[in-house]
Structures are given as structure tokens and as C-alpha cells.
């Protein structure tokens, strides 16, 4: 079958497979999954439960482990250039065309759902839903919110253009807003435009021109206003955060999704667990900066900022795990030359976390962050039929997921086979 084409079968039986259960370190053997109308209808195992009728097509999955489609909770599908300010100046048509390539490649690595953390718009969501382009399910925040001089203010120190010039461009990761009235208006506009959550830049960043890592973004009053607007719309706030001070402040003010969190302390991690905040670390983007940044023309100042938070990333993973914070999978790869490294995050996390913890971060933990528990991230009746087939047992070898081109040989999104 050609990648991306449906078989046309109404009901599909995946049979003779091992199945990854929602918990535990042992696979379900001799398993079957019955799929109909984009949903998992039945999960069976062993001769007593064997499904022998009621399907239009049977696919023999001997030697494969069937597991939920993977979820990446921190992507930027509309970025490609090393300098984010340059990316924001590209024609929207070029940005959209490039995004279709990025989205397709993500799906072909086994990621059936991704959450864009700044840049993607409702047009890309609709194009995916109607089948015009091929890619994962896309959850968007629209433009991330930033104060003047913050992480999404892409102007250099001597650029006095109206910052709203960037707001209207698909290639921009964010928009600038200051003060209670402006942040509320920006939040409401993003939600009106299709945002399913709000993203704020509440700390300094690596790739931005003006903000040191320790920089605190937005006042407490502004963050409180944005959190209120999110709650009014029955959703939540995600925040770009590195330093412990910024993380604690955001958690105290009601931010739910803590992005990056490299410099988190045990005390603040405990507060995250107490408040139900979820961590979304992004290790591979910092490793990529270290490996490739100089050759790609990233400035020495930004490389130095990246080195500081990269060195703390693995300690932060252990700190979060020890505090029993729910951890979701994220990568944050914005540069075209690094986007192919999306699956390396599995390998990096496995240096600190157990294999089961790493897999959970890209399945049930990520689904919890997206408030889609039971809908995605699990092989169970009534869940979306987002399923990947892996040669071998990923519970024993995380490298199978870190190298999807070789080992992920079956991909189903919403009941549609896109790789077989």
C-alpha cells in the first residue's frame, strides 16, 4: 500500500500481535484489535477471546508490538529557519507548504497527535481534518503570547516596527501584548481563532534576541488574567519556562502545562505535583543546538544560553520523576535541519527514566496533558484507532522508537492506515 492511502475497508482486524497494555512491563500476547469507523471496537487476547468474524479486512501483525500512536506535546510545525525572526517574514504560502512536509514526516515517525506550541493556525487544522494534507491530529494555541521584549518578540533591540506586524504572519511563533486589557484581548482572539489552549512566554528563551534566561515574562496580574481567560473558555495555559523562580510563580498563578522546566528544584517539582501541573520537557532541541547550532549560524550568545539549560535537562527529568509529576513528551524542534531528530527524545529520556516512563510520556501522560485521557494514548475499546506497529518489544528496547524509519512499520491514524 502507498503511504497515506486508505485501504477502503470498513472494519479492520489487526491480529497475531503483541499489544502494549496501559500499564505494566509485560506485553499482551496473541492479541487482536478490531477497528471500525475510526475507533477501537474490541481488544482481545488468547484463543478464548479470539475474533473470527465481523470484519472486512484482516492484517497479520506477527512479530509486531501494537501500541498507541505517539503524541508530541511541543512542536512548531510552521517554523523552518534558524532565525525565528526570518521565519516570521516568509510568505504565508511558503510557510504553509513547508508545514505540510513537516506534518507528514511527523506522522510517518508514528506521531498521530501533536500539539503546536506557537505558530500553526486553524487553516492547517482544517486541511488535516478534511484530508487535504496528510499529518497527525493537530492541537493548536495559535500565536503564543509574549510581552514586549519577551521570548516571542522577534524584533532586534533596534527594530522599532509595530510588533503586530508579526502577529499577522503564519511564520511567527507569537504575538506581543502588554497590560491586562491587551493580554485579555489577545487571549480571546486566539481562542476565537481556534486555539484549544493558550501559550504564554513567561521566562527568557534561548532562540530569542532580547531576553536572558532569568528574565521573567509578564506580571503576576497579566498571567492571572490570561489564566482566567483560559478557564472562562474551559481550557488551560501552557507556559515557556526554564528557571525555578519562573516555574514556581507560574504554578502558583494557575498555569497547568510547564514547558521545558530545565532548572526546576525538588521543592517546586513537589508544588507542581500538588497543584496537578504537568511537565513537558524538551531535551532534544537543546542537544541539537549544541551539536549543530554553530554550523547553522546560531549566535554565540544564544548558544551559551542553550548550553546552560541543556546541562540541567537530565537532572530536571529525575527531579520531576522523583516528585511524581506527570511528564509529557515534547521536542520543540524549530529548525529544518533538526526536525528529523524528533524521535531521539526517546533515547535521551531513557538515560534517566525507565523505558515504561518514557513510553508513558508519549502516550498516556501526553493524553492527560491534552485532556484527552481515554481518547488517545491508549489501546482500549472506544479509544481513537491511533495505532502503530513496532518490530520487536519497545518495553525492552527504547531504540525501536528512537529509530522509527527502521522499526515502526505500521501506522494507523483514526482508523486509516497510512503506513503498512
Image: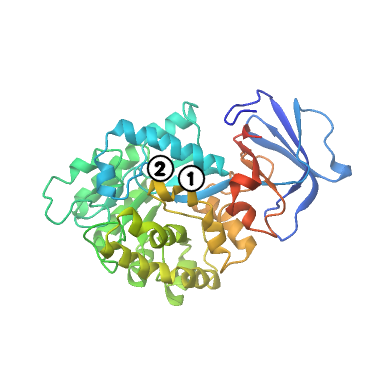
Labels 2 and 1: the sequence-earlier one: 2
The N terminus lies in quadrant: top right
Count residues near mark 1 (Cα–Cα under 10 Å), then give few for <14, some for 14-19, many for 20+: many
Residue 381 appears at what percent x and percent y? 69, 41
Residue 327 appears at what percent x and percent y? 52, 61
Count residues near mark 2 (Cα–Cα under 10 Å), then give few for <14, some for 14-19, many for 20+: many
Viewer-nearest of discs 2 and 1 = 2
The C terminus lies in quadrant: top right
Helix, strand or loop at disc 2? loop
Picture layout, residue 168 above or below residue 364: above
Q: Give the residue number, with chain letter if any, for mark 1.
A: 114
Q: Give the residue number, with chain letter if any, for mark 2.
A: 77
Q: Which residue is drawn at 44% across and 48% down?
A: 339
Residue 90 appears at what percent x and percent y? 27, 38
Q: Do the residues labelled 2 and 1 touch (CB within 8 Å)?
A: yes
Helix, strand or loop at disc 1? strand
Q: Is residue 256 at least partly visible in the picture?
A: no
Drawn side of residue 17 relative to residue 3, left or right: right
Residue 256 appears at what percent x and percent y? 42, 58
Q: Which residue is drawn at 30% across and 41% down?
A: 171
Comparing 118 with 199, the one in front is 118
Picture layout, residue 314 above or below residue 347: below
Comparing 183 with 359, the one in front is 359
Q: Which residue is drawn at 27% across and 64% down?
A: 300
Amino acid at each position: 500500500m502507498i503511504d497515506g492511502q486508505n485501504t477502503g475497508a470498513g472494519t479492520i482486524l489487526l491480529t497475531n500481535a503483541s499489544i502494549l497494555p496501559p500499564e505494566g512491563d509485560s506485553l499482551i500476547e496473541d492479541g487482536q484489535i478490531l477497528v471500525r469507523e475510526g475507533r477501537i471496537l474490541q481488544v482481545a487476547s488468547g484463543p478464548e477471546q479470539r475474533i473470527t468474524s465481523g470484519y472486512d479486512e484482516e492484517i497479520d501483525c506477527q512479530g509486531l508490538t501494537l501500541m498507541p500512536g505517539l503524541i508530541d506535546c511541543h512542536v512548531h510545525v510552521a517554523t523552518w529557519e534558524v532565525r525565528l525572526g526570518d521565519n516570521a517574514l516568509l510568505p504565508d504560502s511558503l510557510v504553509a507548504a513547508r508545514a505540510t512536509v513537516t506534518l507528514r514526516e511527523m506522522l510517518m515517525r508514528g506521531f498521530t497527535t501533536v500539539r503546536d506550541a506557537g505558530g500553526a493556525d486553524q487553516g492547517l487544522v482544517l486541511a488535516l481534518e478534511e484530508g487535504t494534507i496528510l499529518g497527525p491530529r493537530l492541537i493548536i494555541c495559535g500565536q503564543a503570547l509574549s510581552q514586549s521584549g519577551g521570548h516571542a518578540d522577534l524584533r532586534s533591540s533596534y527594530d522599532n516596527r509595530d510588533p503586530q506586524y508579526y502577529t499577522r504572519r503564519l511564520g511567527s511563533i507569537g504575538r506581543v501584548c502588554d497590560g491586562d486589557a491587551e493580554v485579555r484581548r489577545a487571549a480571546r482572539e486566539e481562542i476565537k481563532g481556534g486555539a484549544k489552549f493558550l501559550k504564554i512566554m513567561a521566562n527568557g528563551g534561548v532562540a530569542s534576541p532580547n531576553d536572558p534566561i532569568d528574565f521573567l515574562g509578564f506580571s503576576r496580574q497579566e498571567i492571572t488574567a490570561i489564566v482566567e481567560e483560559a478557564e472562562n473558555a474551559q481550557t488551560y495555559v501552557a507556559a515557556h519556562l526554564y528557571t525555578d523562580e519562573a516555574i514556581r510563580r507560574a504554578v502558583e498563578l494557575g498555569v497547568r502545562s510547564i514547558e521545558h522546566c530545565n532548572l526546576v528544584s525538588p521543592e517546586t517539582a513537589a508544588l507542581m505535583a500538588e497543584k496537578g501541573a504537568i511537565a513537558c520537557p524538551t531535551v532534544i532541541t537543546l542537544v541539537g543546538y549544541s551539536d549543530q547550532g554553530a554550523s547553522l549560524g546560531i549566535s554565540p550568545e544564544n548558544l551559551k544560553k542553550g548550553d546552560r539549560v541543556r546541562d540541567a535537562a537530565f537532572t530536571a527529568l529525575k527531579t520531576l520523576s522523583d516528585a511524581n509529576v506527570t511528564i509529557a513528551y515534547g521536542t520543540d524542534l524549530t529548525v529544518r535541519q533538526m526536525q528529523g531528530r524528533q524521535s531521539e527524545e526517546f533515547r535521551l529520556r531513557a538515560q534517566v527514566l525507565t523505558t515504561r516512563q518514557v513510553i508513558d510520556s508519549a502516550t498516556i501522560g501526553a493524553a492527560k496533558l491534552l485532556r484527552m485521557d481515554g481518547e488517545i494514548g491508549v489501546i482500549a475499546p472506544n479509544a481513537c484507532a491511533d495505532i502503530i506497529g513496532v518490530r520487536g518489544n519497545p518495553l525492552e528496547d527504547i531504540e525501536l522508537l528512537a529509530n522509527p524509519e527502521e522499526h515502526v512499520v505500521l501506522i494507523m491514524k483514526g482508523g486509516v492506515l497510512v503506513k503498512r
